[in-house]
Image (cartoon, rainbow, N blue to C red):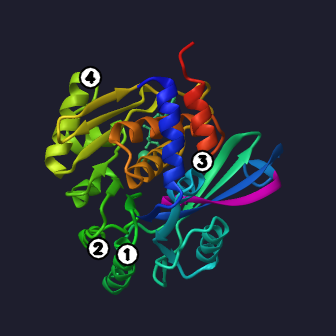
Amino acid sequence: MSEALLERGARALFERMRDKRVLVVGDVMLDEWVWGRVSRISPEAPVPVVAVSDHSFTLGGAGNVASNLRAAGARVAFAGVVGDDAEGRRLLELFDGIEVDRSATIAVSDRPTTRKTRIVAHHQQVVRADWESSEPLATADRTRFCAQVARLAGDCDAVILSDYAKGLFSREVVEAVRGAHVVTADPKPKNIGLFTGVTLVAPNAGEASEASGIAIKDEASLERAGTELLARLSCRYVVITRGERGMALFGADGARLIIPSVARTVFDVSGAGDTVIAVLTAALAADARIELALQLANFAAGVVVEKLGTATASPEEIVALVGGNSGG
Ligand SMILES: Nc1ncnc2c1ncn2[C@@H]1O[C@H](COP(=O)(O)OP(=O)(O)OP(=O)(O)O)[C@@H](O)[C@H]1O
Ligand SMILES: [Mg+2]
């Protein structure tokens, strides 16, 4: 596809995305950031003392997928589980702040809100502390959660299942979204079988290798792994994201597309997979052809890896990168 054509297609597609509604179901996390400077070593133990200058909270895990969808312009509903605690309430406020419908997000009493606290000094992470439980949901909570998911799934143009292996997903949760036209999944290898029958799965190369049992080393092994996952999961598309190598599409109809990454300078690759599944799915919700959806997701990932931290990409930024990527 020529660059001018791609740019025009992208603009028209982002226009259509604005009245699409996407439901994200997944493991949400509160990312907590403590920023500061180190000027001395602690007298208590041989560790740096960070003098804190800033403190902030962002939506992480599946919450970052919701942020990316909002940045792309889609309407978003979120279904997840938080603890009955201050962090859980903070997550709900963060969703409200970006106008995500979180009415299907439930609080449970027997687990903490997943929270990752990072202490960063001089742009370098000093330490990270995690609060989390990866236990499966209690049966009663799962039933309550599935009812909420099913309530919204039929009203949405697409559903994203964003799995961070924190115990949310079970076959019942996946069954609860059966009514949706388009269902995509960003799976962890140990759970991948749960996502059998969805429209599209998008693991990264490491996850695809682990899930298929085929080490991806070159284009031949990439093809074998993609084909194996297509057959095993009976889905229409498998997208394997390959970090700086870009991404590859495998379609049950025989479609194949391998595209290189497009970032000019790479600052921070964390969360790029969230951007990919968000933009791919919003594009499919707006009836894009899969090839265009893949190209846009790749450009969106290019935008976010050029930014520090888990970031999002706006239609303007994505279109600008498409336009600036003529190769000369
Ligand atoms: N180093 C890089 N240079 C250029 N593009 C990159 C780089 N890393 C990632 N990308 C872009 O982001 C996409 C997704 O990245 P990746 O395959 O690393 O996903 P991931 O491992 O699921 O990411 P994460 O788990 O951090 O969200 C790639 O297909 C590519 O378009
Ligand atoms: Mg990922």
Q: Earlier in the sequence, mark 1 or mark 4?
A: 1
- How many residues crowd mark 3 within 10 Å: few (<14), some (14–19), many (20+)? many
Q: Is residue 138 magenta?
A: no
Please report whichever mark, 2 or 4, sits nearer to the chain's N-terminal start: 2
Going by the numbered disc 2, the residue's amino acid type is Ala
Q: Is residue 146 above or below residue 180?
A: below
* Residue under pointer 2: 176
Q: Nearer the viewer, mark 2 or mark 4?
A: 2
Q: Are marks 1 and 2 in contact (CB under 8 Å)?
A: yes
Query: Tag 4's secondary structure?
Result: helix
Q: Nearer the viewer, residue 119 or 104?
A: 104
- As helix, strand or loop, the secondary structure at mark 2 comes to loop
Note whether residue 42 is visible.
no
Residue range highlighted in magenta = 51-63
Can residue 125 be seen in the rendering of this structure? yes
Regarding mark 3 in the picture, which secondary structure is present there?
loop
